Amino acid sequence: MAQFYTPQSCNETMLVQIPPGTVDDLFVHRCQTDQLLVVRGGCVLVNLYNREYEYIPLSEDYPQVVTIPPGVPHGAINLGSEPCFLINAVLRHQAPHQRDYQPIKAPFAYNMEKARQVLENFTLAMAS
């Protein structure tokens, strides 16, 4: 059976590919909100809140829209052997800032074991 999803209101829609083995640097958008939906594969979204990383598993097997508001440093990790494709329905609040889309220095390294574990637990929970 077909499943239908409500399109997200946005100013711009992008298809983003995250290659296998990717561990993105952090970056931040000061003037936009990202609305992400994985359509193929899976990855772990990493957000930096209050000097702590939040690891959010995303997968085509459990479609969900994740919103990243302006000012939140974030990146992606693809630990799989296949690329991850996601749709980003961008809400622009004003013209992009000159430092948007530029990598920023992470205050500390990602916990790759935690990222692996979050994705594994998510996959197991979806299989049951």
Image (cartoon, helix red, strand yellow):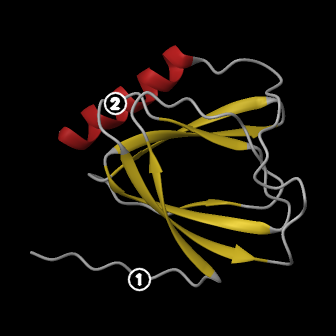
Q: Give x and y (percent) for residue 94.
A: 86, 78
In the rendered image, which quarter contains the C terminus? top left
Choose top left, top right, bottom left or bottom right for residue 82: top left
What's the residue at 35%, 78% (across, down)?
5
Given this view, does label 2 or label 1 mark the residue nearer the observer?
A: 2
| Residue, far top | 113
| CA distance for labels 2 and 1 | 28 Å
User: Left or right: 37 with respect to 123?
Assistant: right
Q: Is residue 77 left or right of residue 32?
A: left
Q: Residue furthest left?
A: 1
User: What is the quadrant of the N terminus in the image?
Assistant: bottom left
Q: Nearer the viewer, residue 112 or 21?
A: 21
Secondary structure, mark 2, is loop
Asked if 7 appears above or below 42 in the picture, the reply is: below
Marker disc for residue 52: none
Query: Residue at horizontal 50%, vertical 31%?
Result: 22
Residue type beneath disc 1:
Thr
The earlier-in-sequence mark between 2 and 1 is: 1
The amino acid at mark 2 is Gly
| In front of the other: 123 or 60 | 60
**SS at badge 1:** loop
Residue topped by disc 2: 80
Residue at horizontal 30 percent and vertical 30 percent from the top: 81
Crowdedness near tag 1: few (<14), some (14–19) or many (≥20) residues, C-alpha within 10 Å: few
Q: Is residue 61 above or below residue 10?
A: above
Estimate the x, y position of residue 2 in percent, counting from the top left: 15, 77
Res 95 quadrant in image: bottom right
Q: Is residue 83 above or below residue 8?
A: above
Q: x, y (%) of residue 34?
A: 64, 64
The disc placed on residue 6 is 1
Give coordinates of residue 7: x percent, y percent. 45, 82
Neighbour tally class for label 2: few under 14, some 14-19, many 20 plus, Cα within 10 Å: some
